[in-house]
Amino acid sequence: MWTIADKIILVAIAVIFIVLLMLINKLNAFMENSNETAVTTMPVPAPKAAPAFSSGIATETVAAISAAVAMCMEESAPGVPYKIASINRRVTSGRRPVWGFAGMRQNTEPF
C-alpha cells in the first residue's frame, strides 16, 4: 500500500521537522545566553566645542549627518569610539547624482 515514493516523502518530512526543532532549540539557547550578558557603561567625556565648518554646509545638515553616522556606528560596532573628521560636498561634474544612480540601478536590476 505504501509505495517507495510515499516512504521517501514521509522520511524527508520527518527529517526536516527534526532539523527545524533542533534549530529552534539552538536559537532559544542563543537568545537566553545573549540576554544574560551584562551591559557595561563607559563614562562619557565632556563634549568639546563644536568645530567651525567653513564649507558652507548648514549646521542643521552637519547635525543630521552626525546623528546618522552615530546611529550606523552604534549598530555596526557598539562601544567603538569614532570621530567625524570632515564633511565635504561631493562634486558631480557632469555625472548623474548619487540618488539618481541608485534609483536607476534599482529599477534596472534583474530579478
Image: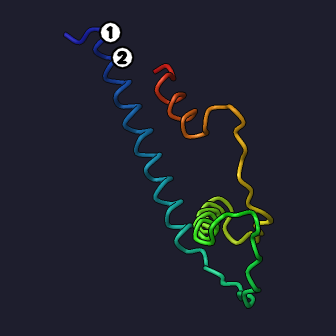
Closest to the observer, 84 or 92 = 92
The amino acid sitting under disc 1 is: Ile
Question: How far apart, in angstroms, are the residues tagged by discs 1 and 2?
Answer: 6 Å
Left or right of residue 33, residue 48 in this image: right
Q: Classify mark 1: helix, strand or loop.
A: helix
Residue 10 falls in image quadrant: top left
Indicate left or right for 51 with 23 as reference: right
Find residue 26 and report its horizontal and vertical position in percent: 50, 53
Give the position of the N terminus as an image quadrant. Answer: top left
Residue most extreme to the left: 1
Check the image and report above or below for 49 versus 3. below
Disc 1 target residue: 4
Q: Name the image quarter holding residue 6.
A: top left
Cβ–Cβ under 8 Å for marks 1 and 2: yes
Reading the image, the residue beneath label 2 is 8
- Rendered position, 90 above or below 10: below
Circle number at residue 109: none
Q: Residue furthest right?
A: 85
Q: Amino acid at mark 2?
A: Ile
Judged from the image, the secondary structure of the residue bearing numbered disc 2 is helix
Q: How is the image coloured?
A: rainbow
Q: Residue at x 48, y 54 (%)?
A: 27
Quick one: label 1, few (<14), some, or many (20+) residues within 10 Å? Answer: few
Q: Point out residue 95 in the picture as x, y percentages from the top left corner.
A: 67, 31
In the image, what residue occupies the spot 76% across and 71% down?
A: 81
Q: Residue at x 53, y 59 (%)?
A: 30
Q: Position of residue 38 (x, y in %)?
A: 61, 79
| Nearest to the observer: residue 20 or residue 53 | 53
Tag 2: Cα neighbours inside 10 Å, few (<14), some, or many (≥20)? few
Horizontal and vertical percent position of residue 92: 70, 39
| Residue located at (78% from left, 63% from top) | 86
